[in-house]
Amino acid sequence: MASPAVASQYWNREELYEDVWSKPLTALMAKYGVSAVAIGKNCHKLQVPLPGRGYWAKKQHGHPVKRKPLPKVHEIRRIERYQRPIVPATVPTPQPAKPQFPVEGEDKADVAQIDQMLASGAFVVIKPRKALRHALIVSARNILRKGFAAKQILQAPWNETCLDIQVSKTALSRALQIMAALISILEAQRVKVCIMPGDQYYRDRSHQTVAIIFGEQIQFGIREKVRKLRVPVAVTPSETSGVQRFTTTYEATGELSVQIHSPSCYFRTCWADTQSSPVESCIPECIASMMRIAVEHRRNTTQRKLEDFFKRLQWEELGRLKAQIDSEEARLQRLMNGANNWHQARRIREYVLAVVERRQEQGKPLGPETALGRWVIWALQQADRIDPLADKPESVLDRKGELDGWSPHGYYSSR
């Protein structure tokens, strides 16, 4: 039984026959809401003939084709067809606004000055033609005009130093004018604009356009929106599969945007063309936002340096504590080793005394010239070598270091 949330109906045999002979199965998926394989299975259940292999290719190129007639059936099965439920259109939820930047301390004067300059119209280009003759703009124009296009976007060679402009050939002139305006306004405010290489650690050969504001590096660039399209591929007469193929192409839309690649938690970082206003009208606000982001980055840098300073102090304090612990542990280990050696020497002496008593009970003589006497003298010397409180008698073991570099197979150098 069909679910009440899904509208159901029965397959119409005559309508299905007309559809499968007028369009390929892949073109009917949107109408019936199922795959081409499911449509073919239902045709088989309803005894609806299907076009043979190569039918659509022949028909497309004007070759004569023959439609199979719909056979007459006395009893037709009733097969339910399920359609997708109608989903009500949802209202997109608005993106949450960024929190207000907390202005504190020395940042107040800089933020107030930026707002005053924006309100007074200070962020405008005074000499547009002179801005287009800037060395960075002229170099970028020469490089990008000779560059190749990938997905409709001009690419600068990896070994060329170029501004961060990723647009199509038709939008290059306008993008250079926008970039020239940005550089002109920034340099009028005594801000240095330069090109820095990408991060070679991540094999990034691209270059980054950077404005050094309040000692912070603010990256920015210009992008063009590209639309991805699926284009059907023309079928040749030799292809008899009857399946439509598609290829992917890219189309430049001409919609430009100015993007600030430095992250910010409080300020806007992207301005794009709209139907009411182009991105050129947002250049003053873009400059002001770049300067505000620099203030934010400066505060974060100061806070990070302060945190690093306290972490370094803590690390040094822990280093001194580690040295004290290691020294105390080494001292304790020497104490334990000395006590163990003293206890072991004492056990050896007790063992030697027990052996002597046992041998005397057996009637064996004890003297310095006897085997037992020589063994007793040797054993007591070993006990004295271990005992940390006794004098260390000489032993052949003291010459063990002379064997370095010697082996039964010949002499070799240990170095």
Image: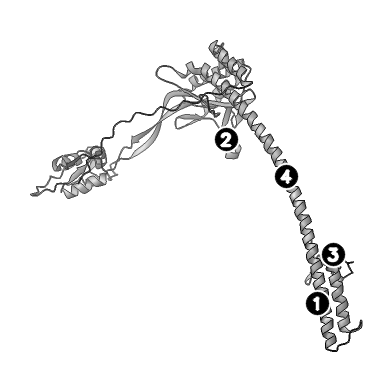
Q: Say whether residue 276 is left or right of residue 1.
A: right
| Distance of label 4 from label 3 (alpha carbons) | 33 Å
Instruction: Quickly name the residue at label 4.
Output: 319
For marks 4 and 1, give the CA distance: 47 Å
Give the residue pinned by disc 1.
351
- Percent across and percent down for residue 287 are 55, 19
Q: Secondary structure at mark 3?
A: loop
Please state the horizontal and vertical placement of residue 247, each as a whole percent of the image. Answer: 37, 37
Q: CB under 8 Å between callouts 3 and 2?
A: no
Of the pair 49 and 80, the residue shown nearer to us: 80
Q: Say few, some or many: other residues with alpha carbon within 10 Å of mark 3 (under 14 / 14 to 19 / 20 or more).
A: some
Q: What amino acid type should be assigned to the residue bearing mark 1?
A: Tyr
Disc with the residue nearer the chain's start (4 vs 2): 2
Q: Residues within 10 Å of mark 4 (few under 14, many from 20)?
A: few
Q: Is residue 25 left or right of residue 275?
A: left
Spatial CA distance of label 1 from label 2 is: 78 Å
Number of dots carrying numbers: 4
Q: Are marks 4 and 3 in contact (CB under 8 Å)?
A: no
Q: Quadrant of residue 111?
A: top right
N-term mark: 3 or 1: 1
Q: Which one is in front in this view, the residue at disc 4 or the one at disc 2?
A: 4
Instruction: Give amino acid for label 2.
Output: Arg
The numbered dot on residue 388 is 3
C-alpha separation, residue under disc 3 versus residue under disc 1: 19 Å
